Image: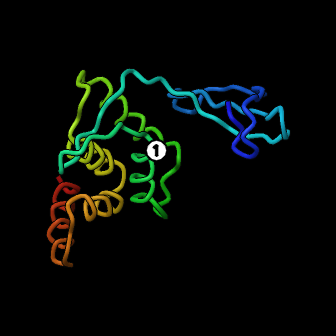
Amino acid sequence: MRCPFCAHDDSQVKDSRPTEDNSAIRRRRQCSGCGARFTTFERVQLRDVTVVKNDGKRESFLRVKLEQSVSLACRKRGIGQERIDQLISGIQRQIETLGDSEIPSGRIGEMVMEGLRQLDSVAYIRFASVYRDFSEARDFEEFASTVRDVAHD
């Protein structure tokens, strides 16, 4: 594993343990070159998945992009990182077990929407505002009224 500090390509694993939701192995490493310590995560990847964007472009599925989107929607909401990681791992598992090597980006967006809807209504509305491209306050009002209706059912 290459050191993120000095780029030396040899490090020793000092500690390994599963993450809270058992979806990955957390490893503490120490660089043999500069002695710096850093953490890596090892996850199971069932298959390579290609995301098909709305404009037809294709790119590899990257968990980090999913993490960034969900984390931004959940920012300052008091949602524990463990719950966010569980949501992300669940979505990634769904994507990898669909059996398809390609998935439309809209399908991923819907998975995120469903997960956030169950997790936190404000994070759900935040994500929806970007995903559904809200352009006016009225768009928020209309969407928020449907969230209230779902919450009271």
Left-right relation of 48 to 109: right
Q: Name the spot of residue 73 as percent of width and height, x first.
A: 39, 59
Residue visible at 31% across and 59% down in the picture: 127
Left-right relation of 88 to 130: right
Q: Amino acid at mark 1?
A: Val
Quadrant in the rendering for residue 150: bottom left
Residue visible at 36% across and 55% down in the picture: 120
Quadrant in the rendering for residue 52: top left
Q: Name the spot of residue 135 as percent of width and height, x first.
A: 20, 74
Q: Nearer the viewer, residue 72 or 36?
A: 36
Q: What secondary structure is marked by label 1? A: helix
Q: Does 141 sit above or below residue 73?
A: below
The coloring applied to the image is: rainbow
**Disc 1 designates what residue?**
64
Residue visible at 83% across and 32% down in the picture: 32
Left-right relation of 51 to 146: right
